[in-house]
Amino acid sequence: MNMLILAKVKFDLRDPDEIYFAQREIDALLDTKTKFIKTIATLIKDKPFNLLDEEVIHLITRLVYMGEGQGFLADIPLTNITSVVKRPTFLENYMQFLK
């Protein structure tokens, strides 16, 4: 069984080049290759995102980064990622994880 992880780029990111560093770091932390998401809103039309509650969709789509690339999507085996999310990394300053 797998789970999808959406890592959202923070809306106030100052340097757009940092998105690529963040992607490399999340790839390493999750031991996978993430998919670069240009626009998070486009995810809502596809499963499983179209099955989400309105409040969750609102959280995912509000305050998105206005540059190219709004997040990363990973499809990984079911696992506990709490330690990854809480780890003080580059991602802490540049990414938002839905908890």
Image (cartoon, rainbow, N blue to C red):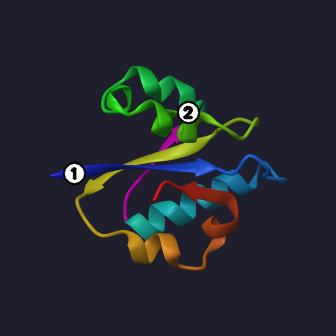
In the rendered view, does 77 fall on the left or right side of 37? left
**Which residues lie in the magenta part?**
31-36
* Dominant secondary structure of the residues highlighted in magenta in the image: loop
Looking at the image, is mark 1 or mark 2 earlier in the sequence?
A: 1
**Residue depicted at 49% across the width and 36% down the height:** 55
- x and y, in percent, of residue 49 in the image: 38, 32
How far apart in space, not on screen, are marks 1 and 2 (Cα)?
A: 20 Å
- x and y, in percent, of residue 64 in the image: 68, 39
Toward the left, the furthest residue is 1
Judging by the rendered image, the residue that carries numbered circle 2 is 40
**Residue depicted at 76% across the width and 52% down the height:** 17
In the rendered view, does 68 fall on the left or right side of 97? right
Going by the numbered disc 2, the residue's amino acid type is Ile
The label number, if any, that marks residue 82 in the structure image: none
Q: Locate residue 88: give its quadrant.
A: bottom right
Badge 1, how many Cα within 10 Å: few under 14, some, many 20+?
Answer: few
Residue nearest the viewer, comparing 8 with 54: 54
Judging by the rendered image, the residue that carries numbered circle 1 is 2
Q: Secondary structure at mark 1?
A: strand
